[in-house]
């Protein structure tokens, strides 16, 4: 029965012209995004040879989400999210072209990388809350869970193939080629968005409040919801594990495994392979209780495989642990997103999902402290500490799940 269910979901989704166009734009954009992301991390490490500098550039890419994200999420709930998304991606194309220009002219040093990282984060602080409103508007509600899972598979497929492509480009071509392919992908994304046929945006009744008041209203809605607050907490720890190990891959590849760009691409690609398997498999999940169980099991496995990866100095075991980590962390992430998107009031969608994204990025802010912390207690010990906190959180989530399962059979309230 499983194969026909998956086949039916595919047929329903790809019969929709909007989803076919979304697929082209999403796959291409995500693939080339990971090429640029890995190229930027590798170049920063090669220039500085400093965990602190790598952490600082990552911090500057992340902090704009916290500076501008709340404002952007309110704007997305007030205005046409599609138009906002198109505008943000236009500026993302400009940022990618600036990276190409800087690398071609020899101006690409740490200060320039840091500045462009901040610009990149600023642009996507506006694109992320707007993007969360695209699928609910483009596909029927009955297909939303499958659409979310399949769209996650595009990102994870790119996480698998992107590093492989990046490894080839970094090993055989000047660095600007890696940045150029991302710029071309953004251009294609803009063209495809223009060709989508979406129903008119529903008019939004002005609240009469300021941006700050509207943002607090969305935050209160999330925190008072019996399910969403716990889902946001799980997002913090699961994405914290993903973000920390993902951003630090150049260090582990270079220092622990003594491998170059090809080895880095293998480690990153192994993570993406596991993630792609998970997100495609979850596309046929229709039971929200299953989503809860998958989230918990995936989160637990992600903790164990993180400790294994950090502990080993054996390349094949490191690759295996990254495949398992990618599968587990993506299963938890996709199931979490399905539950979040399915339980939201659309009036608050961008604000809640914007907050979910901020929560997912919070752990990345700690990367700025990698230099001092690793010098004080060691990089491995820092990772063990975060994994320990995640284990405590998992126990608390399990207690919540058991209590909810006993008192309610309604998982969509």
Image (cartoon, rainbow, N blue to C red):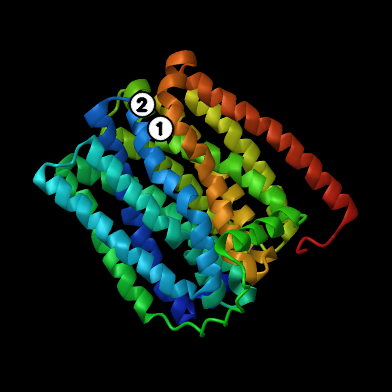
Residue at 58% over, 54% down: 355
Examine the rendered structure and indicate whether residue 309 appears above or below residue 403. above
Mark 2 and mark 1: Cα distance apart in space: 8 Å
> Furthest-top residue in view?
376
Element type where label 1 sits in the image: loop
Quadrant of the image containing the N terminus? bottom right
Asked whether the beta carbons under mark 2 and mark 1 sit within 8 Å of each other, the answer is yes
Instruction: Tell me if residue 44 can be seen.
Output: yes
* First in residue order: circle 2 vs circle 1: 2
Q: Residues within 10 Å of mark 2 (few under 14, many from 20)?
A: many
x and y percent of residue 301 in the render?
61, 37
Task: Identify the residue under disc 1.
Answer: 248
Examine the rendered structure and indicate whether residue 349 appears above or below residue 194. above
Quadrant of the image containing the C terminus? bottom right
Examine the rendered structure and indicate whether residue 123 appears above or below residue 400. below
Q: Nearer the viewer, residue 180 or 279?
A: 180
Element type where label 2 sits in the image: helix
Residue at 32% over, 43% down: 38
Examine the rendered structure and indicate whether residue 327 appears above or below residue 259. below
Task: Identify the residue under disc 2.
Answer: 51
Residue at 42% over, 68% down: 85
């Amino acid at each position: 029965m499983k194969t026909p269910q998956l086949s039916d979901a595919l047929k329903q989704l790809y019969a929709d012209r909007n989803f076919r166009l979304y697929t082209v734009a999403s796959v291409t954009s995500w693939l080339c995004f990971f090429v640029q992301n890995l190229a930027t991390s590798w170049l920063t490490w090669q220039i500085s040879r400093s965990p602190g500098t790598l952490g600082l550039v990552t911090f500057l890419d992340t902090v704009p989400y916290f500076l501008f994200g709340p404002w952007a999420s309110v704007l997305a709930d007030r205005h046409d999210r599609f138009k906002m998304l198109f505008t943000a991606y236009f500026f993302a194309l400009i940022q990618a072209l600036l990276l190409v220009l800087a690398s071609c002219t020899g101006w690409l040093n740490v200060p320039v990388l840091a500045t462009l990282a901040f610009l990149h984060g600023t642009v996507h602080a506006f694109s992320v809350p707007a993007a969360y409103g695209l699928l609910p508007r483009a596909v029927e509600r009955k297909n939303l869970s499958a659409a979310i899972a399949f769209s996650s598979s595009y990102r994870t497929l790119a996480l698998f193939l992107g590093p492989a492509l990046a490894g080839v480009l970094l090993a055989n071509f000047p660095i600007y080629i890696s940045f150029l392919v991302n710029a071309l992908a953004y251009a294609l994304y803009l063209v495809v968005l223009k060709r989508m046929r979406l129903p008119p945006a529903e008019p939004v009744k002005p609240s009469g409040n300021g941006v700050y008041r509207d943002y607090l209203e969305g935050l209160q809605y999330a925190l008072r919801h019996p399910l969403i607050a716990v889902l946001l907490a799980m997002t913090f720890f699961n994405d914290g594990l993903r973000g920390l190990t993902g951003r630090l891959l150049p260090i582990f590849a270079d220092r622990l495994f003594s491998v170059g760009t090809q080895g880095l691409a293998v480690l990153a690609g192994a993570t993406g392979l596991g993630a792609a398997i998970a997100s495609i498999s979850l596309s046929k999940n229709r039971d929200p209780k299953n989503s809860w169980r998958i989230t918990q099991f995936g989160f637990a496995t992600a903790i164990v495989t993180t400790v294994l990866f950090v502990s080993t100095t054996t390349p094949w075991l490191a690759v295996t642990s990254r495949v398992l980590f990618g599968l587990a962390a993506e299963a938890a992430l996709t199931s979490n997103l399905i539950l979040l998107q399915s339980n939201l009031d659309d009036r608050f969608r961008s604000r809640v999902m914007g907050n979910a994204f901020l929560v997912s990025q919070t752990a990345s802010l700690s990367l700025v402290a990698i230099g001092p912390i690793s010098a004080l207690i060691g990089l491995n010990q820092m990772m063990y500490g975060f994994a320990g906190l995640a284990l405590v959180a998992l126990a608390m989530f399990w207690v919540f799940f058991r209590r909810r399962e006993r008192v309610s059979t309604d998982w969509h309230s």
